[in-house]
Image: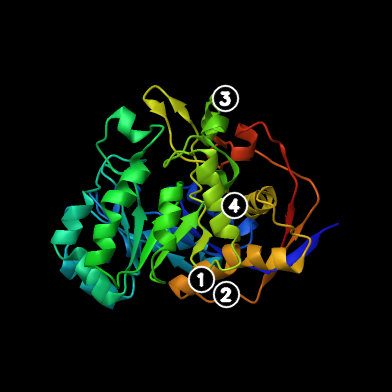
Amino acid sequence: MISFSLPYWYDLHAHFRQGTVMADYIQAHINMACAGILAMPNTKPPVSRVTGSAADEYWTIESYLKDLRASGGHVFSDIIVPLYLTQDTTPDMIRAGTQSGYLRAAKYYPPHGTTNSDHGFPLRHFMENGVFSAMEETGVVLCLHGEEHGLTGSDYFDQDTNAEDVFYTRHMPVLVQKFPKLKIVCEHITTRTAVDFVSAQGDNVCATVTPQHLLYTAGHLLQGFKYHLYCLPLVKFNADRAALRDAVTSPTNTRFFAGTDSAPHAVKATACGCAAGCFTGNIAPQLYAQAFEDSGVDLATKNGQTLFQRFLCDNGPRFYGLKVPDKRFTLKKTPSPVHILTTREGTDITPLPLGMGQDTLPWTLER
């Protein structure tokens, strides 16, 4: 039986929502040996201020951190909450937020591009109003949802182009040229275009990759419409998945790392359309291990285990300046069942594998 140990890891992109169910989603991350989390700020209202108490029209990083810790997050070594960039974000807010100690990252959402992104504003606005300049000056990390907004359907997802391709060919070259020292995480990338862009940059530009984008393609989503795989950005094609797999398993990989984008939804299919997001709480390391094996990595070997640890445990903390923990967990090549998560409010959250008809994983995690 294959068995190997790893340092506790950081999920550097995940959603924990709000209210009493936060405790269930945080516990799911504790269960999969997370040392810490980067918690997305697209709550209702958004986390669009840094310090002080929450208000009806916005929350603050300080107040959301308090809620996360009170809901069980106090056990984590670290929690990063990015500032949601809105039309009200100013350079002075960035500088003051950095001095407060709460502001370490800021999140760009394409307007109306994904769940709770209605407060997003075009990227060029922040290039021109001094916000990105202040972030470059202070070392605040820019976390990017890299998709163009406002496209027609045929441009949004087509055989030859899509919203991510447009973003990484039209906007990102301008951004890195204008702000060459800005620290950037290209989040949940899905295309060969994004992989090639990140690979061509310096050490200040990195990317997160989710389990679903390493495991599946658009064909898996559309064959019978497996809507539990519906996420944004959408899963793409074989060539894109191959590029992602090559990037994360490369012996020279130092800038692609784990960020699950785990997003719990009690109801996926709604009258307004399908809710975007895959829930991979409790099981993400097992899914990543499955993806590495699907990519041809032999996790029975020391070399394969080193490649996996580099992606899951090492690269992300190095970029964000986080301590790699001494505490370790074990992955074993033995089947484990996948369970519905029933929250304390009585709602059921379906993990991605179950939504894809897979009720057993080939790996087991032991803490």
In the image, residue 276 sits, relative to residue 89, either above or below, namely above
Q: What percent of the width, then of the height, locates residue 358? A: 69, 35
Residue for point 48% across, 31% down: 268
Residue extending farthest to the right is: 1
Q: Are marks 1 and 3 in contact (CB under 8 Å)?
A: no
Q: Secondary structure at mark 3?
A: loop
Q: Which residue is mark 3?
A: 223
Model colouring: rainbow
In the image, residue 362 sits, relative to residue 349, either above or below, namely below
Mark earlier in primary sequence (4, 2): 4
Q: Which mark is residue 317?
A: 1
Q: Which residue is mark 2?
A: 324
Q: Residues within 10 Å of mark 1 (few under 14, many from 20)?
A: some
Q: What percent of the width, then of the height, locates residue 163? A: 34, 40
Q: Are marks 4 and 2 in contact (CB under 8 Å)?
A: no
Q: Secondary structure at mark 4?
A: helix
Spatial separation of the CA atoms under disc 1 and disc 3: 37 Å
In terms of depth relative to the viewer, which is nearer, 173 or 81? 173
Amino acid type indicated by mark 3 = Gln
Q: Are marks 1 and 2 in contact (CB under 8 Å)?
A: yes
Spatial separation of the CA atoms under disc 4 and disc 3: 29 Å
Mark earlier in primary sequence (1, 3): 3
Residue 230 in view, yes or no: yes
Q: Which mark is residue 28?
A: 4
